[in-house]
Image (spheres, helix red, strand yellow):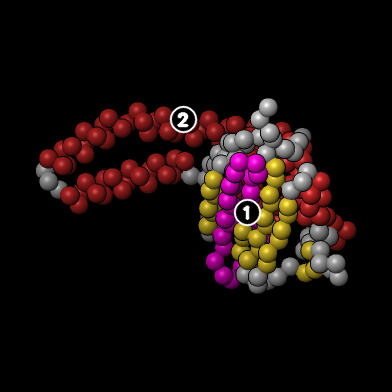
Amino acid sequence: EELKKMKSEYEERLLEVENNIRIYQHDMENHLICLMELAYEENANRVMNYVKELKNDFVDRKKQFYQTGNFIVDVLLNHYVSLLSDDVKKDVKGKWIQDLDVTEVELCSVFSNLMQNAVEALIKPITNKKYLEIKFVQGKTYAKLEIKNSLERLPEQDRQGNLISTKEDRKKHGIGLMNVRRIVEKNGGKFEIEMTKEEFKSIVILKLKENL
C-alpha cells in the first residue's frame, strides 16, 4: 500500500516536471529573440546574466526529480529524497537501465532499507555539512550502487559488528541492513559498509540479467 502511494507521488511529480519543461521549451523562441537583441547591442554582461538566469530557471524546473532508468528505484529515490530538508546537499549520478537479476520485491527491500538509513541520519541535527551522494554504475554483467551520507557520530555496533539502530524500536537493531545483506548475497552479489566519524557509505553490487 505504501509503495502504491509512492508510485502515485512519483507519477504526479513526473507529470509536473514534464509540464514545466514544455513551458520552458515553449518560451525558448522568445528568449532567443531577447538574446539576439542583447547581442546586437554588444552588451556581453547582460547576455551572460540572461543566459545564467535561463539556466537557473531550467534547473529549478527539474530540481529534485531523479530518473535512473529503473522504475522501482526511481519511485523510492524520489520519495526519500523529498523527505530531506533544503540544507542537505543532494548529488545523484548514473543510470541503471538494464534489468537486475533480483525480483522487484527484493530490489525494493534493498534500496528502501539503505535510503531509510541515510534519511534517518540526515534528519538529525548535524553540526558538520549535511549531504547525500548516490551513484549508480552499470557494467557489462554487474551493477553497482554507492550511497554516502554525512554523520554526526559513528553508529553503535554489537559484538558481531552489526549496526544497532538508533530508532526507538530497539527490537529492530540492524534488521534492515541485515536484510539487505541477506538479499544481496543470496543473489550472488556483494554488500559492504564503510564508516568514518563523519560519513556512512553503503556499497551494493548486483548481477545483471543475462540477455538471451
Identify residue for label 2: 19
Q: Is residue 110 left or right of residue 90?
A: right
Location of residue 39 with respect to 164 vertically, above or below? above
Location of residue 79 with respect to 11 vertically, above or below? below
Q: Amino acid at mark 2?
A: Asn
Indicate which disc residue 146 carries. Answer: 1
Please say whether residue 128 is one of the residues in the magenta stretch: yes
Where does the image place residue 19, in percent across and percent down from the top left? 46, 30
Q: Quadrant of residue 61?
A: top left
Q: Quadrant of the N terminus?
A: top right
Query: Residue, x 54% and y 33% (percent of image)?
Result: 14
Q: Which residues are magenta?
A: 118-145
Q: Quadrant of the C terminus?
A: top right
> Which numbered disc, 1 or 2, marks the residue closer to the eye?
1
How far separated are the C-alphas under marks 1 and 2? 31 Å
Question: Which element type, helix, strand or loop, lies under badge 2?
Answer: helix
Q: Amino acid at mark 1?
A: Glu
Indicate which disc residue 166 carries. Answer: none
Query: Residue, x 67% and y 55% (percent of image)?
Result: 203
Please say whether residue 136 is one of the residues in the magenta stretch: yes
Q: Quadrant of residue 3?
A: top right
Viewer-closest of 155 and 195: 195
Query: Badge 1: few (under 14), some or many (20 or more) residues near its Cα, within 10 Å?
Result: some
- Kindly tell me whether residue 183 is visible in this rendering: no
Question: Which element type, helix, strand or loop, lies under badge 1?
Answer: strand
